[in-house]
Image (cartoon, rainbow, N blue to C red):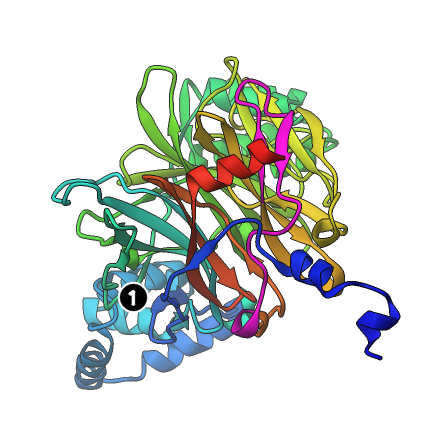
């Protein structure tokens, strides 16, 4: 007598439990992490050691400097389009440690910068948790094809995560062709001394309860717009003009953290999508950028922009963050605030509903919520929409990216955590006008970790950060055990019919 007979569970019931609710097509792609994909990072040291390194570099003759630089350029130019600019940038960060009376040649500055530079393999450990949207550029394609942009979470040494991109095409027969990636990667540079609008900055301080008397004093003197440097200067002058330091340190921390959490990335005109790396650079992101959920957002006037929500992690706290771009030439990055801006996995709906921005989130780390707001950066109102219900989601239910609009309702892919901390992917259908109302849920998971998908850095996990509708198919890129990425697709009519059948 086998154990199923002992438990009196009919085999037909076990088969039904394991069966997908509809047919799922597995695509042959497997996107593996590539250890050759490197970016250049600042390799810093404390002030004393920095001084010693520079002092030793000063002992090299001009001839030695020239020879070493020539060798470095030979070895590293192929992987870095702008390695000279990087060395000069890193030299600038240590220039204060150069003796003031010392005159340096341009070549020696480059070499000193190189001593404070290191390669970092952004994909050395994993390439996973994908999100997919239609690309901004759709020209030159045959009828029935769509070009897509896919983001992925790349993880390297020390489990520090960044965001990388791939492009590809889905043809009329739903074949997926991934474009050949660029041989180089480069971290997108953030504008550190960007300008801020005083009125918006004041409102954001108010939104987070940080608009103190000190802060008002600072903002009253910076004019209509200000730079980070000007803000820092006014904060220091405000301290000097007050007899008591009480409240000043808190004001300084709040204002600078808010300013530094808002930045702009400028994408070089010649950069291919697969070259771009959004690497942690602010204090909020110091331990990684996780799980970007891209969405193509349509404004009330019909114009289109792209948003992406991600989790910035500093080793202790997760900061929900939003990036925004209209043209992929510049990307604005801002921290999301409000009582409901917490935990991981916030995903923006692709348009307003009833005049409000709407977001899916998991405020308590366990249940699924629907949030609404007048301001895409501030979230204070939310309603629990779904609790764990079925066997495969008894531990946690959360979203798997931004909802997709159909005539029948919003399709929201969900992740459920079940026994043995297995992650599964399911689907919920939400009402178009009231997305807090679920019209149906898959009783069985759509995608279950099996075979090789169960083996990896975090075993027994399938996970996605966003899918895309192409014709009559739902295209789902998904990660396998936090290491690599593949694709599945399902018939959209069959999926919607599943909800009609109940």
Q: Position of residue 260 (x, y in %)?
A: 50, 41
Mark 1 element type: helix
Quarter of the rendering containing residue 66: bottom left
Q: Is residue 215 visible?
A: no
Give the total number of marks visible in the rendering: 1
Part of the protein shown in magenta? 427-453
Asked whether 293 or 387 is in front, the reply is: 387
Residue 344 in picture, x, y percent from top left: 62, 45
Residue at the image position 74 percent from the left and 38 percent from the top: 387
Note whether 122 is above or below 291 in the view shown: below
- Residue 427's place in the image compared with 13, above or below, is above
In what quadrant of the picture does the N terminus appear?
Answer: bottom right
Question: Is residue 343 shown to the viewer in this render?
Answer: yes
Q: Is residue 258 magenta?
A: no
The residue at the point 45 percent across, 72 percent down is: 51
Against 9, residue 319 (above or below) is above
Residue at position x 26%, y 66% from top?
Answer: 184
Of residues 280 and 459, the one drawn nearer to the viewer in this rendering: 459
Whether residue 173 sits left or right of residue 385 in the image: it is left
Name the image quarter holding the C terminus. Answer: top right
Residue 488 locus on image (x, y percent) = 43, 56
Tell me if 268 is positioned left or right of 393 in this view: left
Say if 418 sits above or below 57 in the image: above
Depth check: give the residue in front, 460 or 43: 460
Mark 1 surroundings within 10 Å by alpha-carbon count, few (fewer than 14), some (14 through 19), many (20 or more)? many
Q: Which residue is mark 1?
A: 87
- Is 446 inside the magenta-drawn segment? yes
């Amino acid at each position: 007598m086998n154990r199923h007979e002992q438990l009196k569970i009919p085999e037909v019931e076990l088969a039904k439990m394991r069966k997908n609710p509809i047919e799922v097509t597995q695509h042959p792609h497997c996107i593996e992490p590539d250890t050759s994909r490197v970016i250049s990072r600042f390799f810093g040291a404390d002030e004393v050691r920095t001084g010693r390194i520079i002092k030793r570099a000063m002992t090299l003759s001009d001839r030695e400097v020239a020879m070493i630089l020539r060798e470095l350029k030979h070895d590293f130019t192929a992987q870095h389009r702008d390695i000279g600019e990087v060395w000069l940038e890193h030299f600038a960060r240590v220039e204060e440690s150069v003796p003031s009376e010392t005159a340096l040649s341009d070549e020696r500055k480059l070499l000193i910068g190189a001593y404070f530079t290191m390669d970092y393999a952004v994909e050395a450990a994993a390439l996973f948790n994908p999100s997919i949207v239609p690309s901004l550029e759709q020209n030159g394609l045959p009828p029935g094809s769509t070009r897509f942009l896919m983001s992925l979470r790349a993880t390297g040494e020390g489990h520090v995560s960044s965001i990388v991109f791939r492009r590809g095409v889905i043809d009329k027969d739903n074949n997926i062709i991934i474009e050949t990636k660029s041989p180089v990667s480069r971290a997108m540079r953030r504008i550190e001394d960007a300008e801020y609008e005083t009125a918006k900055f004041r409102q954001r301080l108010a939104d987070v309860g940080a608009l103190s008397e000190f802060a008002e004093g600072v903002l009253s003197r910076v004019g209509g717009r200000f730079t980070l440097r000007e803000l820092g200067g006014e904060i220091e002058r405000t301290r000097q003009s007050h007899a008591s330091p009480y409240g000043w340190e808190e004001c300084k921390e709040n204002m600078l953290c808010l300013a530094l959490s808002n930045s702009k990335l400028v994408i070089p005109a010649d950069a291919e999508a697969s070259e771009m790396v959004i690497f942690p650079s602010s204090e909020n992101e110091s331990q990684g950028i996780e799980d970007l959920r891209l969405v193509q957002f349509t404004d009330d006037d019909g114009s289109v922009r792209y948003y992406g929500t991600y989790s910035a992690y500093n080793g202790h706290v997760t900061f929900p963050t939003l990036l925004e771009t209209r043209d992929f030439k510049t990307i604005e990055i801002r921290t999301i605030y409000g009582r409901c801006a917490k935990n991981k996995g916030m995903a923006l709906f692709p348009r307003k509903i009833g005049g409000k921005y709407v977001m899916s989130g998991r405020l308590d780390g366990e249940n699924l919520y629907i949030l609404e707001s007048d301001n895409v950066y501030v979230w204070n109102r939310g309603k629990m929409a779904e609790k764990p219900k079925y066997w495969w989601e008894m531990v946690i239910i959360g979203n798997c990216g931004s909802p997709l609009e159909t005539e029948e309702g919003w399709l929201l892919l969900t992740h459920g955590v079940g026994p043995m901390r297995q992650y599964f992917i399911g689907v919920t259908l939400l009402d178009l006008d009231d997305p807090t109302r679920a019209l149906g849920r898959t009783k069985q998971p759509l995608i279950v970790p099996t075979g090789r998908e169960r083996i990896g850095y975090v075993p027994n996990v399938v996970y996605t950060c966003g899918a895309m509708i192409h014709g009559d198919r739902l295209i789902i890129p998904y990660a396998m055990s936090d290491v690599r990425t593949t694709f599945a697709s399902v018939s959209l009519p069959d999926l919607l019919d599943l909800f009609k059948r109940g």
